[in-house]
Amino acid sequence: MDGSQAPRRGVRTTCPYCGVGCGVVARPDGAGGTAIAGDPRHPANGGRLCSKGTALGETLGLEDRLLHPEIDGRRASWDAALDAVAEGFARALERGGPENVALYVSGQLLTEDYYAANKLAKGFLGTGNIDSNSRLCMASAVAAHRRAFGEDVVPGIYEDLEQADLVVLVGSNLAWCHPVLHQRLLAAKAARPGLRIHVVDPRRTATCGSAELHLPLRPGSDVALFAALLVHLHEHGHADTAWLAAHTEGAGAALAAARPIAAQAAALTSLDPALIARFCAEWAAAPRVVTLWSQGVNQSSAGTDKASAIINCHLLTGRIGKPGCGPFSITGQPNAMGGREVGALANMLAGHLDWDQPGEAAALAGYWGAPRLAQRPGLKAVEMFRALGDGRIGAMWVMATNPAMSLPEGEAVRAALAAAPFLVVSETTRRSDTARYAHVRLPALAWGEKDGTVTNSERVISRQRTFLPAPGEARPDWWIVAQVAARLGHGAAFAWDGPAAIFREHAAVTGLARPAARAFDISGLAGLDDAHYAAMPPTRWPVPEAGPGTGRFFAGGGFPAGRARLVPTPFRAPAAAPDADFPLRLLTGRLRDQWHSMTRTGAVPRLMAHVPEPCLTLHPEDAGTLSAGELVVAETPTGSAVLRLALDQAQRRGTAFAPMHWTAEFAPAARINGTLAAVTDPVSGQPELKHAALRVRAYAATWHGFLLAPRRLAPDLAPWCAIAPLEGSAWRHELAGTGTPAEAFARLCALLDGPGLHWARLEDPAAGLFRGAALLDGSLVGMVAVAPSADLPPRAWVGMLMASGVLAAADRAALLAGRRPDGPPPSPLVCACHGVTAAAIRACGADSVGAVGAATRAGTGCGSCRPEIAALLAARTTEPA
Ligand SMILES: Nc1nc2c(c(=O)[nH]1)N[C@H]1C(S)=C(S)[C@@H](COP(=O)(O)OP(=O)(O)OC[C@H]3O[C@@H](n4cnc5c(=O)[nH]c(N)nc54)[C@H](O)[C@@H]3O)O[C@H]1N2
Ligand SMILES: Nc1nc2c(c(=O)[nH]1)N[C@H]1C(S)=C(S)[C@@H](COP(=O)(O)OP(=O)(O)OC[C@H]3O[C@@H](n4cnc5c(=O)[nH]c(N)nc54)[C@H](O)[C@@H]3O)O[C@H]1N2
Ligand code: SF4
Ligand SMILES: [Mo]
């Protein structure tokens, strides 16, 4: 595991996407390219990578990067930009005190960057107003851990999923969102078929493909299911009474609260009582159970209670901390866990120190030499942006997150950002919806350039190492923070010479104010010298100064709070209940091949090919007169968005699903968070990003069209526009609007016009049909198609013609006819790793996922598409001949 033994030229680092935290070996070729492979020696992935990880080498280009500081949109020197930030914050402090400034940071910062930002805010600006996008992600899990255990601790490790008899996945689409861990789980199941999987999710997701039981519960009703389980476990003699007596409190109260809810569980969840009974019986009978949860639990107005209801069942049975057992909150971002460690949430201090624990704040202030340590928690994300909108925040600094896309009440957030008296954004990309509002833009180092640590879902700290030179004038996030701190007069406390020095300080903080029994302790790493930091192998915490650490926590009690607490969890339905006006329930979440606001994955053609447009998915029986492929308006009581309609039997009746990913850069009219109200969980402050009441109607466009161009155009081409890259370096712009098709066609063609261009056109004004192929020296360089309906020539085919050199006469004729000359229509891409389409999988004749892999290589790369291959095979066998 020693980094110094890495193969020559290969740099061992960590994937910058999800919380699985896979090890990556990156080999730059010296000519601008980088070969990416899974690190066979990393404990999280043992060499595996998913589609997003595999494509990392394709995200390292500099086209869209922010490479120089900017003030008011104009390039500035670092000195001028840093002075401007320091002055802006000093002015806001002078006018309104520490409450008047705020930092909004991210689980995509390295621990060292995160530590520096938190130290500046809480220690030296003296404000609690630093919150993280983890408020949108992990806050409910954090709150549930704290009230159960007394500290934010994930007790288990990944091996527990492999060693369990039963793994229950609650509100988690593991197959798409934590694909490598899902592959580990499936491999364990293949080796030991007794391992059972249950999925609790309103939708039948790709994750359900390998599950014995799918519980498609009513959105928001998880508390009722786990209340039923708690009561069942107690009534059937599965409570571990000796363990309960020795290590816990509150079981009686939790059970008393659960009983009336359990009695109505079937009505509240709308699940078949027999299904609930089977779920409870299997859970009870499995000696080793892991209940893993994610955003279907956390992102809810009852998120903390949902998580507590799960933890209660594990505490009641003592199934925690032992091999194959435990409640497991899986983290989303690469360093969601690190952010919690450094205390960059508004209600936490550094190193899991706590305002509520006597002496801890003072110990931290003393160690930092911080005379003005924040006296109390600050504003949580939703409140923070409301305060910005109300003029209560004079200066805000956003780092490594895109709140204009990701927060609820998106339109209000945009208005607040636009009206901010002073907004600083540290970014890697120019294509961030948030950065466009900034007064000062600061270019940060990106993955491959930056250097530091991240902590994954199982508490393993891994190094992200540099393998590319710093481009332009980009700098590490920690350096930027330290420079601003120095300009505000705090240079001595931020005089680090590199990330190793910050890491040592962070490690030392975790040893402060002992012997309070805190689980998070890496004080044993506080003496790491630079060379050992550089070579640090993946290391699971705790790493106490004295004695060995533990792998799992709490098997024998030893809770930070002394006793663990079972918490009564009242039932609360989601705030947005459907009614006659808004009869559907909107669910939101992720797609397999996209990452959040698409600033990286959105530029990779093979990742975009999986779902190239923002779609709203409905059950076919909820579609009424609407048909798949048409544009629809998704309307909630607080906003609307326009998306392409997809129909899927796997969608629960009465619900719709929309992806979170599309931004103003990619599809301005399809931003789903503009439709979401900001209802927050009363304990954690986490917003209910998963649910809204919804109605759907046809979008009244008078024309539909597309424009394929050799470059990316601005998304204001039409009232509805969605942009995606195509293989072969063309860009696809899907369009719709009002006005006449003829006008739209003329306007769009004019955008492509250029010297030497020759147009081949087909115009049928009476039918509203227009096609134009732009040719340069006989090669296709662009195409415009406009029609009254969304029935247009296949874009992937046109894109291929653009990449194929001089056009044959038959292809040119076919282009204008809008039909391929021969062969089947293009088929959707299923395997992003090997570029295998659904048609190729259907055609190969194989009848198992393994045989498809042998015949076509589909599913043999990262494996993320294996559930989709299985579904294709299943559909084929049930299709009438
Ligand atoms: N491909 C990809 N992977 C990612 C990310 C990404 O952007 N793209 N982001 C990463 C991050 S930051 C995170 S936080 C994780 C998120 O990982 P997940 O939480 O697994 O992903 P989501 O799609 O947000 O939501 C999971 C499921 O919750 C279900 N759900 C909705 N409401 C309810 C409910 O009331 N109860 C239950 N039980 N389920 C419900 C949805 O139908 C959805 O299938 O993914 C990480 N991994
Ligand atoms: N409707 C709905 N909304 C959601 C969710 C949902 O399920 N549904 N999920 C929520 C969750 S769980 C999450 S985690 C959030 C995620 O939402 P965001 O955090 O807002 O999304 P990202 O696109 O990951 O934003 C990260 C930004 O940081 C930049 N960046 C990358 N690396 C660096 C770096 O090293 N330094 C700096 N300074 N910048 C960098 C990227 O270019 C990008 O613009 O979305 C939340 N919003
Ligand atoms: S599962 Fe995929 S996205 Fe997550 S860390 Fe591993 S390679 Fe990266
Ligand atoms: Mo997240």
Image (cartoon, grey):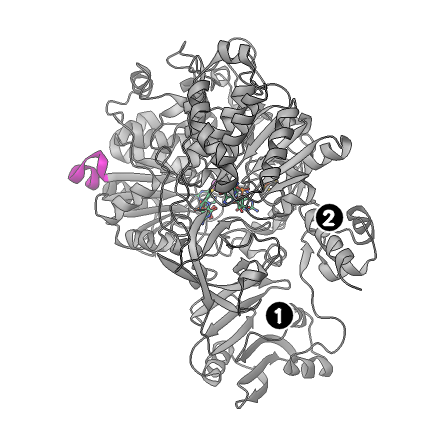
Say above or below: 875 vs 712.
above
Where residue 170 sits, quadrant-wise, is top right
Q: Is residue 111 visible?
A: no
Q: Is residue 352 visible?
A: yes
- Ligand 3 within 8 Å of the CB at mark 2: no
Judged from the image, the secondary structure of the residue bearing numbered disc 2 is loop
Residue at image location 19% in from the left, 41% down from the top: 91
Q: Is residue 699 magenta?
A: no
The amino acid sitting under disc 1 is Arg
Dominant secondary structure of the magenta stretch? helix
Residue 340's x, y, as percent?
43, 29
Q: Is residue 785 left or right of residue 304?
A: right
**Which span is picked out in magenta?**
91-100
Where residue 88 sits, quadrant-wise, is top left
Residue 139's x, y, as percent?
42, 34
Residue 157's x, y, as percent?
59, 25
In this view of the protein, which residue sits in the foreground, 349 or 505? 349
Judged from the image, the secondary structure of the residue bearing numbered disc 1 is helix
- Which one is earlier in the sequence, the residue at label 1 or at label 2? 1
| Residue for badge 1 | 795
| Residue for badge 2 | 859
Q: Marks 1 and 2, how far apart in space? A: 25 Å
The amino acid sitting under disc 2 is Gly
